[in-house]
Amino acid sequence: MADSYTTLNTMLMANHIPPATAEQIICDTLRFLQFQSICDTLRADRNKYIRWLSLSRQMLHPAEFAREITKNLCHCRLDEESYHLMGKWLLAFFRKKDYRVIYPQKIRTDLLHQQHCHCAICNELITDRAELDHIIPWKYVGDELDNNLQLLCFTCNRSKKASPLYQLQMLLRTGKAWSQTPA
């Protein structure tokens, strides 16, 4: 039986995926899975939610808060870049409003131009009728993050839902990673 490293390299080569692209999307997916786990834990336990909300207001730096919450709720350690991103995502989680922002048409037009009229996931051609999508799902961060929007085709938007696994599937299909991780 081949070892995991050989299997991964074979999959990457067979699908023409640069190792750096695969590494980036796997890291992004692992970060999001940790974030999703924390959010789901906090939603399930009101006392934990209130405790961590209070602590988030006391800590001066988002990365410091992310370090504490991942250590206590997930019993794991992350790298500094992940703590920095996770801290911003967690603060957005706590600030999330119960309503969606209605974005002006200019946002769609700008995204369409930035994405060169292609779906951010499958790379198919799209028009200005493409669907506006939150990279980190709205149910976790609302509209609180900068650079958290992309345009997707109907199929990708419906398939993605709030799961990072669709990104991994599309990586194998297209060899393309997210345009950027929201910060």
Image (cartoon, helix red, strand yellow):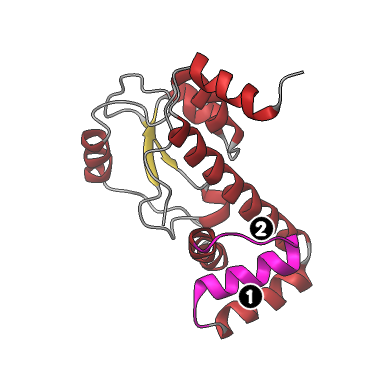
* Residue in view at x 42 percent, y 28 percent: 176
Question: Number of labelled discs?
Answer: 2
Return the disc, 1 or 2, that comes first in the chain's sequence: 2
Mark 1, other Cα within 10 Å: few <14 / some 14–19 / many ≥20: some
Q: Where's residue 95, x and y in %?
A: 52, 68
**Is 173 left or right of 150, judged from the image as shown?**
right
Instruction: In the rendered view, tell whether residue 15 sits above or below residue 99.
Output: above
Q: Amino acid at mark 2?
A: Cys
**Mark 2 falls on what kind of element?**
helix
Q: Is residue 74 left or right of residue 90?
A: right
**Amino acid type at mark 1:** Leu
* Callout 1 secondary element: helix
- Residue at 65% x, 73% y is 68
Query: Farthest top residue?
Result: 14
User: Where does residue 158 sit, x and y in percent of width and height?
Assistant: 53, 28
- Judging by the rendered image, the residue that carries numbered circle 1 is 53
Which residue is nearer to you in this view: 41 or 71? Answer: 71
Residue 159 locus on image (x, y percent)? 56, 27
Residue range highlighted in magenta: 60-80
Q: Residue 141 colored magenta?
A: no
Q: Is residue 166 above or below residue 37?
A: above
Residue 152 lies in what quarter of the image? top left
Q: Residue at x 50, y 33 (%)?
A: 22
Location of residue 14 in the rendering, given as x and y in whole percent from the top left corner:
51, 14
From the image, tell me which residue sits under label 2: 39
What secondary structure is the magenta-colored segment mainly?
A: helix
Bin the neighbour count of mark 2 within 10 Å (Cα to Cα): few under 14, some 14-19, many 20 and up. some
The N terminus appears in which quarter of the rendering?
top right
Which of the 4 quarters of the picture holds residue 183?
Answer: bottom left
The front one of 126 and 25 is: 25
